Amino acid sequence: MIVSISDYGDGDDGKFIRYSVSGLSESQLDYLKANLDEDVVVNDDVLTLTMHFSDELYPFQSDVAKIRLDDFIAREEIEMNVFLSSFLEDM
């Protein structure tokens, strides 16, 4: 499974992070699409997951995040990979 952040920032519904997830089987894609509460779209075997955050919980809000943004993006990608992996264990 490969997780990457494809977009982030402020949207109409507040702050968000959009993840692109590839390398999943069709059954894994179907399971995630059916069981995740977040906004999920599957297109060409790539799952796009959009998570919305309050201002307090948005991970890219701190001054340190603005200076070391690449580190914060990498951490978020790793955390989402771990979350989805543990979620898929319940299949």
Image (tube, helix red, strand yellow):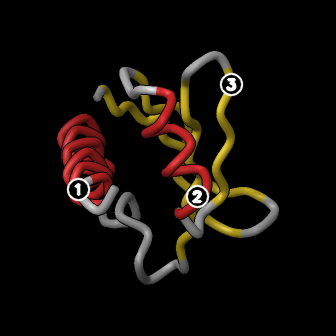
Q: Judging from the image, what secondary structure is the residue with disc 3 in?
A: strand
Q: CA distance from mark 1 to mark 3?
A: 23 Å
Task: Decide if residue 32 is on the left or right side of residue 64.
Answer: right
Q: Amino acid at mark 3?
A: Asn
Question: Which residue is more in the foreground, 25 or 40?
Answer: 25
Distance from the alpha carbon under mark 1 to that under mark 2: 26 Å
Q: Quadrant of the N terminus?
A: top left
Q: Is residue 87 visible?
A: yes
N-term-proximal mark, 1 vs 2: 2
Residue 73, above or below 51: above
Secondary structure at badge 2 equals strand
Provide the residue designation for mark 1: 89
**Badge nearest the viewer, 1 or 2:** 1
User: Dot 2 corresponds to which residue?
Assistant: 16
Mark 3 or 2, nearer chain start: 2
Q: In the image, residue 76 lies at what x, y percent? A: 28, 50
Identify the mark nearer the N-term, 1 or 3. Answer: 3
Q: Which mark is residue 43?
A: 3
